[in-house]
Amino acid sequence: MDDQPRITADTALPVIAESLDALEQAVRRDLLYTSYPAPTWIPPRQKDGQRVLDVAIVGAGQGGLGTAFGLMRERITNIAVFDRNPEGREGPWVTFARMITLRTPKHVTGPDCGVASLTPRAWYEAQHGREGWEALGKIPRQTWQAYLDWFRGVTQLPVSNDTEVTAIVPDGDLLRLELVTPGGLLVRHARKVVLATGIDGSGRWQIPRIVSENVPAGRFAHTAQDIDFAALAGKRIGVLGAGASAFDNAATALEAGAASVDLCLRRRDIPRVNPYRWMESSGFLGHYAEMSDLLRWRFIRHIFDLNQPPPQDTFWRCRRHANFEYHTGCPWSSVAMDGEEIVIGTPKGEMRFDFLIIGTGFQIDLSLRPELGRVARDVAVWSDRFTPPAGEESPLLAGHPYLGDAFQLTPKIPGTAPHLANIHNFTFGATPSMGLSGASISGMKYGVRRLVAGLARDLYVGDAETHLASLVAYETPELVSTDRADVSEPDPAPKPVV
């Protein structure tokens, strides 16, 4: 009823743990109190003398950790998470991300799966108090990585670092994973594989051929690569791209002492509207994937056309430098070397630089992923399943994988390649099919829930005959006596709590 009191964040703030130790005690309590039903339920399987993993997760960034924790909550515990990077350097946050803070609001919930004591806010307040949280604008990227590191540790997730999955190969009704580890080559088998490999996990970072074929290696870099910014001091830097990462890298170069930075974009204006803020509603995040192909196409086509602008603070981070300029309507039509100078031809005239930073995003193409090399040719993309109305074409969208209801790959030819249903794509490439998910902090709350539910469903239904046999064989009595002598007075009814 409208006149009923409502609980809000202001009227029902939780008691704050005063230290991480206290918070970790709260985590253990919360997990204990919400542990029903407790038993694990998946029958074990063996292959080549080794236990088969129920789920293998490739990638230990936020999407992989959230998925692993969600599975553990569903008592799917025979899992493993593999990441090729050293511990603490999974994902972009302390590697190639160069923004100062996250772009998302601080109130996002990460991989916590609804456990309040595991949220970023609980972790931050345990160290800085409620006043610290209230004073926080957005979460610094290094702080987000520290939160993920803490989350992984307190939940005791089974992560193997420095372990790269180089191939996923069908092997009967299982998937064989070939791995490179510090101890050498390794093979593991799994019933399900989740790809949680981030923004570029359905393809690779893209550098225009006009740059890569005409500029020597070492004189250019993609925004997702390691860049020695200190070495750019005193240099003239050209940046190509209109997105937030292009501006982040431009700002980093300026702060490192670059002589000048010119950012070029082919659009007539810098993108200004951020569709990600519009998408952050429970309706869209929770139910986008249930819409028709036509509606999903129209939603994501419009969102991609808008692009994601640099946040205002990122733009001012560049603009405060007098030696920064941006040039709209300025694509690079030619790239050549003139001695040691890089010469760029543009509609606005010639530009000369010492180093180039490329912020042109990524290419979606599963065949470019080494781990999918033996299955990619069989995977359906949107162009295999959907033809848009005239005038609404999008080659970009058409090449994205067309996924099932739980992020699973689908076959290009229906009825073939049944192994694809056991490979779940939790990368940015899932966006047209599933909306925001594992590669986006904003979408994790709903993406993890959908993915975990689908994995659990498939694993249970796949073992339905075994579970039925278990039921038929179940003989643990609850009524243990019918002897009158064993009758005792019933316990009194409990008193109501006032």
Image (cartoon, helix red, strand yellow):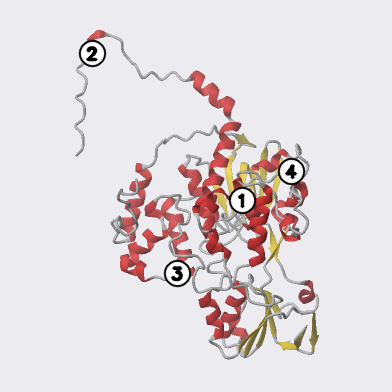
For residue 3, the mark is none
Q: CA distance from mark 4 to mark 1?
A: 17 Å
Q: CA distance from mark 4 to mark 3?
A: 41 Å
For residue 138, the mark is 3
Observer-side mark, 4 or 1, equals 1
Q: CA distance from mark 3 to mark 2?
A: 64 Å
The number of numbered badges drawn on the structure is 4
Q: Where does label 1 land, which residue? A: 434
Label 2 sits on a secondary structure element that is: loop
Q: CA distance from mark 1 to mark 2?
A: 58 Å
Which amino acid, by three-letter code, is at mark 3?
Lys
Quarter of the figure that contains the C terminus: top left
Q: Which residue is drawn at the image coordinates 69% and 65% (left, top)? A: 362
For residue 411, the mark is 4
Q: Where does label 2 land, which residue? A: 487
Residue 486 vs residue 282, the one in the foreground: 282
